[in-house]
Amino acid sequence: MNTKATMIQNSEYTISDISPELMRGPQWLRDLRNKAREDFNQAPLPRRGLHLWRYTDPGKFMYELNDASDTTYGDNYDVVEKIERHHVDEGTLAGLVTDLGGREIKRYGTEALAEKGVIIMPLSEAIEKQHDLVEKYLYQAISSQTGKFEAMNGALWNDGIFVYVPNGQVIEQPLHLLREAGMENSATFPRLLVVVGKNAGLTLVDEYGGGSMDEDKGISFVNGAVEIFGLAESKVRYVSLQRQTSATNSYLTHRAQIEQGASMLTIPLVFGGSLCKQNFGVRLNGAGAHSDIYGLLFGSMRQHFDNHTLHHHAHGSTSSNIDFKVVLKDRAQSAYTGLIRIENGARNCEAYQENRNLLLNPGTKAQTIPELEILNEDVSCSHGATLGSIDQESLFYLQARGIAKNEAVRMIVSGFVTTTLNRVPVDLRERIETFVAQRLEGI
């Protein structure tokens, strides 16, 4: 969906039962959409200051939808699309899918994948052609029970992307999704459903761009949902790149479920927007399942970020690791909450969690809250957090060798983020390094 939208100042807004999105799809989908609408309307706005809303005003993700509009998109979209289509032609990408606010979804270079049984198509098309597969998984990881804003997406998404990799099929090159938000006073609801079969493999780059450039003209709103299912012995790598524009309020929930022997690598890269709240979670559902989350956030100006990570060990003999790095300059703010939950019957689990924050100047602010919910004693689990400025001894060491202060700071920050950047697919890494370099300018 991509409609006119305005922010409202209270929680009285409700989704109308005549919203056109509620009427789309077969009856089972319409029932789920209407359930999401009812749950959204009945759920109170999360109370400010409680748990995951300690540092962010939930009211800023509430917006009233007006008549549908022909929302335009920024010029940068065409530039990025051209770059990625070139990567497809070169063979460094397995394929490209572009999504203009859920209104226009196109595929490039996916014909060879289709010959291998890989399904990549708009979610609306998959609901018709892959009914049993989609109905089995859609809304199973993210539903109206996940939260009020997840219910909003569940009711109002217009169209999304569906990816299925059959058993035993390994896609060697990354598949790139390029999703563009509308400009001022628009609301988009991107949705993604991914199913990776047994002994199959997939690397997915999920890029979010666009939005309003001028808050005085109006804010862009984005409310996204990503569901990923990795079956037994599968290997999934998921990179989320958020580079939205400076007057965009963005809310994203990601949930993955992996089965016996499966592995999941999640790399959240967070650079854009004015206000951004993201929730990344993985449920480890079978023995031998392993999940890594390696995040990198770079904030500047007055950007406000709020990130939550979750590793839910629902089965024994599973392992996980979280390393989330934050770099802030100017008056940017970051809040990070990370939860490790290990169920009572999930014995012999290993879980680690670390959040490191680097503050480049006075005026920045970072909050970090690591959380453990361990319901049995047969585990190995630890967490840690650091928060501080540039190490003055390291800075002095570099300056004493003739390196200018600004360049020395850039070198220290580069070293801080290098381990995360090295885990990004090669075709994307150069652009990410450019984003980092741009934010270091003027130091």
Image: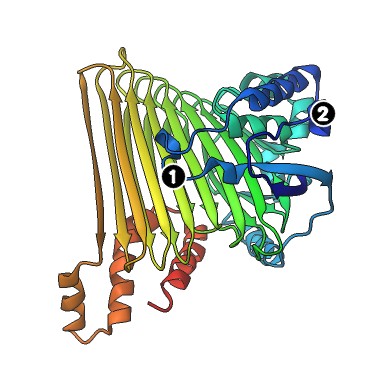
Whether residue 199 is visible to the viewer of this picture, yes or no, is no
Is 213 displayed left or right of 359 in the figure? right
Q: Return the x and y of residue 313 as percentages of the image width and height.
A: 36, 23
Q: Amino acid at mark 2?
A: Arg
Q: Return the x and y of residue 205 as percentages of the image width and height.
A: 55, 49
Q: Between residues 100 and 298, which one lies in front from this camera angle?
A: 298
Q: Return the x and y of residue 421 as percentages of the image width and height.
A: 39, 57
Q: Label 1 belongs to which residue?
A: 307
Q: Quadrant of residue 341?
A: top left
Is 153 displayed left or right of 389 in the figure? right
Q: Amino acid at mark 1?
A: Asn
Q: Residue at horizontal 60%, vertical 25%?
A: 43
Is 160 displayed left or right of 369 in the figure? right
Whether residue 233 is visible to the viewer of this picture, yes or no, is yes
Q: Secondary structure at mark 2?
A: loop
Q: Label 2 belongs to which residue?
A: 24
Q: Residue at horizontal 29%, vertical 21%?
A: 317
